[in-house]
Amino acid sequence: MKGQKDRVLPVIEKLLKLIQQYLAALKPEKYLIEGQNKGEPYSTTSLENIFHKYLGFVIKNHNFTLHCLRHSYATHLL
C-alpha cells in the first residue's frame, strides 16, 4: 500500500469468481497470495521468477518486469 492509500480497481466477474474459489479452498490468513508459511507474504523474488518463466514461453528474450505489468494494467484501465 504505497502512501498508505487504498486503491479500488475494477475486476471482471470471471476473475472475481476465481478469487472467491481460491479464498474458499486455501483460506489465506493475511495476504491474498501467501508464501510458504501461512500469514507470510510471497517473496518478490519468487514472483519475479514466475513472471519471467511464463512470459518467456510467450515472448522470447523479453526485458519486461512486474512493474511494466503494473503500468500496462493501469494504462488499459484508462
Image (tube, helix red, strand yellow):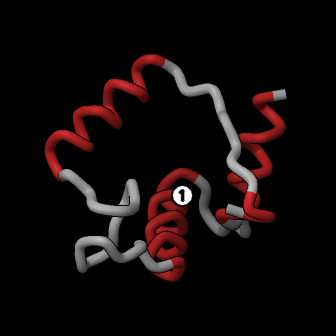
> Where residue 21 sits: x, y (%)?
23, 34
Residue displayed at 78% across by 40% down: 74
Where 12 falls versus 31 (above or below)? above
Q: Nearer the viewer, residue 4 or 31?
A: 4
Residue displayed at 41% across by 73% down: 42
For residue 15, side relative to residue 74 (left or right): left
Q: Nearer the viewer, residue 37 or 64?
A: 37
Where 19 falls versus 49 (above or below)? above
At mark 1, the secondary structure is helix
> Where residue 60 sits: x, y (%)?
60, 62
> Where residue 56 sits: x, y (%)?
53, 63
Residue displayed at 14% across by 44% down: 25
Residue that carries the numbered disc 1 in the rendered image:
55
Q: Classify mark 1: residues with Cα within 10 Å, few (<14), some (14-19) or many (20+).
A: some
Give, as a three-letter code, the residue at label 1: Leu
Q: Quadrant of the C terminus?
A: top right
